[in-house]
Amino acid sequence: MKPKQIIIELSILIAIYLIAYFCWPVLFGAVYGSMTLDINMHDTYFAMSTSPWQTLVLSTFVILSTLLYFIRAAVKCYKSNLVNFILITCNFGLIIALIKIYRFILIIEQTFDANSKGWTIYPPLSALGGHEYPKAPVTHPHFDSYMFIPIIIFMLTLVISCIFTGKNWKTNTHEQTSA
C-alpha cells in the first residue's frame, strides 16, 4: 500500500468523524454546555445524559463510514484491499452498535410491558360492586423482531466483503501452494 493512499483514507475517516461529531450538538439544540436529551413517553421519562455522547458520535461515524466504504468497495469491485479492510472494520463496528441499539429497544419494551397493566387506585372500583367490564389487553408492536433484519444484512455484507478481500489478497511466493 502506498503512503499516499493511506493518508487519503485516513483523511476521509477523520472528515466523517468530524461530521458525526459536529452534527449531534446541532441535533440536540445545544452547541456548548450540557447536552441532555429528555424523552417523555407514555408516563415514562427517559433522560440521556452526556455519558452516551461518544456512543452517539461513534455509532453515527460507523454508520456513515460503513455506507460510504460499501459504496466505494462496490464501485471498485472490491479490488482495493485497504478499502475492503476499512469496510470490514466499520461493518463489524456497525454490527456491535446495532446489537447495543437492540439491547436498548429490549429495555424500552420491558418498560412498556411492565407498565401496560396500569395502576390501581384504592379503593378499587371492583370493591364497590356493580358490573365489571372485561379488560381489553394492551398490545404494542414489538420492534425487537425488526432489529434482526439489519443485523443479518450487515453480517452478510461482512461475510461477502471478507470473501472478496480474501480472494484479492496477494500471497507471497513462499506461501503459494501448488495445485
Image: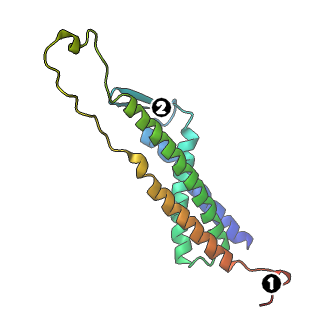
Of label 2 and label 1, which has the lower sequence position?
Answer: 2
Residue that carries the numbered disc 1 in the rendered image: 176
Disc 1 marks which amino acid? Gln
Q: Position of residue 87 (x, y in %)?
A: 60, 65
Closest to the observer: 30 or 111?
Answer: 111
Q: Position of residue 38 (x, y in %)?
A: 42, 30
Residue that carries the numbered disc 2 in the rendered image: 36
Q: How far apart are marks 2 and 1 (CA)?
A: 56 Å
Judge left or right: residue 7 versus residue 87. right
The residue lying at 55 percent from left, 53 percent from top is: 61
Judge left or right: residue 155 versus residue 144. right
Please tell me how crowded label 1 is: few (under 14), some (14-19), or many (20+) other residues with Cα within 10 Å.
Answer: few
Classify 127 as above or below 85: above
Judge left or right: residue 38 versus residue 83. left
Q: Element type at marker 2?
A: loop
Extreme residue toward the bottom, this view: 179
Residue 29 visible? The answer is: no
Q: Quadrant of the C terminus?
A: bottom right
Q: Position of residue 127 (x, y in %)?
A: 22, 11
